[in-house]
Image (cartoon, rainbow, N blue to C red):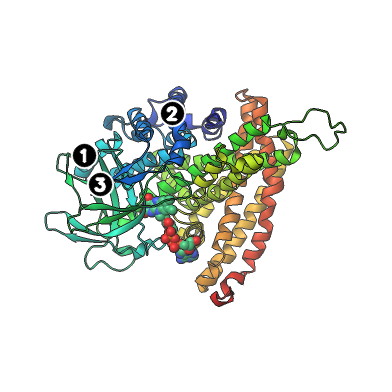
Amino acid sequence: MSAQLMDRQDLEFLLFDLLEADKLCERERYAEHSQDTFKAVLDTAERIAASKFAPHAHDADEHEPRFENGKVTMLPQVGEAIRAFADAGFLAAGHDDESGGMQLPVSVAQACMTLFRSANTPTSAYLFLTAANANLIRAHGSPAQKQRFLPALLAGRWLGTMALTEPHAGSSVPDARTTATPVGDGTYRIRGTKIFISGGDHELSENIVHLVLARLPDAPAGARGLSLFIVPKYRVDGEGRVGARNDVALAGLIHKMGYRGTTSTILSFGENDECLGELIGEPNRGLNCMFHMMNEARIGVGLGAAVIGYTGYRHALEYARTRPQGRHPDARDPASPQVSIIEHADVRRMLLTQKAYVEGGLALCLTGARLADDARTAADAAARSDADALLGLLTPVIKSWPSQFCLEANSLAIQVHGGYGYTREYPVERLYRDNRLNPLHEGTHGIQGMDLLGRKAGMDDGRAMRLLDTRIATAVANARASGDAALAQHADALAEEWQQVQQTTAVLLEHLATDRRAGLANASIYLEAFGRAIVAWIWLEQAVAALRARERQRRSADFVAGKLAACAWYYACELPRNAAQHELLRRMDEHALRMQPAWF
Ligand SMILES: Cc1cc2nc3c(=O)[nH]c(=O)nc-3n(C[C@H](O)[C@H](O)[C@H](O)COP(=O)(O)OP(=O)(O)OC[C@H]3O[C@@H](n4cnc5c(N)ncnc54)[C@H](O)[C@@H]3O)c2cc1C
């Protein structure tokens, strides 16, 4: 079975036609870059992904990491892939030239990541976590911490984790109990147990840098009492040299449904009271610092979900083109040759649904990455602040929508394969298992729904919602001005749908002010409806960009026709599903809220 990486034409369409990433080169930070250098980095990513990541994806799933003789062992190819990635500079993709980075925009760096993740998501996870870990240290570390930790992390000699979750504190992170007691020399003794820590132990690197949430003595209860600590597996001296083993013990490996190549660990900090960590950021502001990593991780989770769905779709497409089965319903001759299953309308329906979900999800996540670029480098402070606010509002959608619908795409990819899709001979079942994680980690769906409705939608008196309103109005106007009748119709549908979302939001926010419990009872349904409308906006933007690309003869006729057909399908078959959800939300449906535990 051939490796299916991302479709390069689509990636370049999204980067250059939809998001106009080459215009970023007009900004001082990216002035050394051009569309050509961006394409060259994509070429390198594609080459390494195909040669070092894809070949062991199946084997790493079959041979999970094991804990033997006090060490975690796994396939050697995982380490080789990590080294190839780091040697090519991808860990430092967004970092400054002077610190050995490539100084790439977030959108381009994330587009590169899609190639690695489509080749092998679990191996990429070590790198994705390390990059986010290094970015947090860059943003919140003291100059000395940056000097001691960043060079080794960016070179991939050390790998990083994020350690929030505890057995009794999963969704409810503020209930974490791990403690940090000052030693008196600037370090802290860390004690506690963390669970589900990805990449928490292995022999892939010289050191592992854990970022651990813990409580200082007398810290207030809840989120305002959490501080963040750098806790390395091996202690690090003032010069950044690795020293003695720290008291961080692997209490066990967790065996999972998917993502099997990534170690999932239970870590015990300070069993012998010898675990030393150092504070990063201000005391009791740990969750704020961690949000830096978590927001990046949430966009990364959405992107990962979109990419796994995308990869499954590409496999399904290849299979459907080559699998002969049955004949057209009006074929009379039983001796006539069988047709490829892509000839059947129902198979095309499944493929079109997948295409609309995965290309919509990918475009959504890269739009998020482009907003991150604007938040960092837009010309004026107001534009940077607007991009940041809009990205904050969209983050729960970026995390959740692909996790739900691109997982559905993986299920459809299995369906397209028939019984073969259910076997381990074909990668689609592995992809489904890998993607099933994404609605769970980095804040479950339920938590994202409450974040969107309970915090983001009304934040700053609805400022981010107004920014979104402006963006959607612009997309509607552009589609109406395109001269394409179908797009003008979609524009009307989007304008109407967005009004519905705003009205539903207003009803829910009003209710929330007086009854938070009832107001948030259907937050997950709100998240789904909101996300469906957002992806309608993203699809309209894609369709307009596709028409523009056709005019400029930048994309093939089939490519553009495919984009327009997927957009049309989304407006005809997906967006109308919102009507019932608006109705349920506005009547403040209380079926779930009123259901009693004893009645189940
Ligand atoms: C493979 C894997 C990798 C992970 N990697 C990491 C990692 O690297 N670092 C790390 O720190 N953590 C990691 N996690 C932990 C992950 O973030 C948590 O599993 C997740 O946040 C959910 O916590 P929980 O499992 O304790 O579930 P719970 O919090 O017990 O949730 C169970 C269910 O109850 C719902 N629920 C809980 N509270 C509420 C509420 N207030 N309102 C409504 N519904 C609610 C949830 O939505 C969910 O459906 C990982 C988890 C997995 C499975």
Task: Give amino acid for label 2.
Answer: Ala
Q: Is residue 354 something one can see in this rendering?
A: no
Q: Of circles 2 and 1, which is in front?
A: 2
Q: Identity of the amino acid at label 1?
A: Gln
- Give residue 175's position: percent from left, percent from top: 35, 65
Horizontally, is 229 left or right of 174 in the view? left
Question: Which element is circle 1 on?
Answer: helix
Q: How much space separates mark 3 and mark 2, taking CA atoms?
A: 29 Å
Distance between the alpha carbons at the discs numbered 3 and 1: 9 Å
Q: Residues within 10 Å of mark 2 (few under 14, many from 20)?
A: many
Q: Give the residue number, with chain letter if any, for mark 1.
A: 147
- Farthest residue in the right direction? 332
Q: Residue at x 33, y 63 (%)?
A: 176
How far apart are the two marked residues, 2 and 1, measured between alpha carbons?
Answer: 28 Å
Disc 3 target residue: 141
Q: Judge: label 1 CB < 8 Å from ligand 1.
A: no
The quarter of the image that holds ligand 1 is bottom left
Q: Position of residue 382 (x, y in %)?
A: 42, 46
Q: Secondary structure at mark 2?
A: helix
Q: Which of disc 1 and disc 2 is earlier in sequence? A: 2
Can you tell which quarter of the image residue 360 is in? top right
The percent position of residue 316, horizontal first and vertical second, equals: 62, 36
Q: Where is mark 2, residue-wise?
A: 45
Q: Is mark 2 within 8 Å of ligand 1?
A: no
Residue 519 as seen in the image, left or right of residue 84: right
Residue 368 against residue 95 in the figure, above or below:
below
- Mark 3 or mark 2: name the one nearer the start of the chain: 2
Q: SS for tag 3? A: loop
For disc 3, the neighbor class at 10 Å (few under 14, some 14 to 19, many from 20) is many
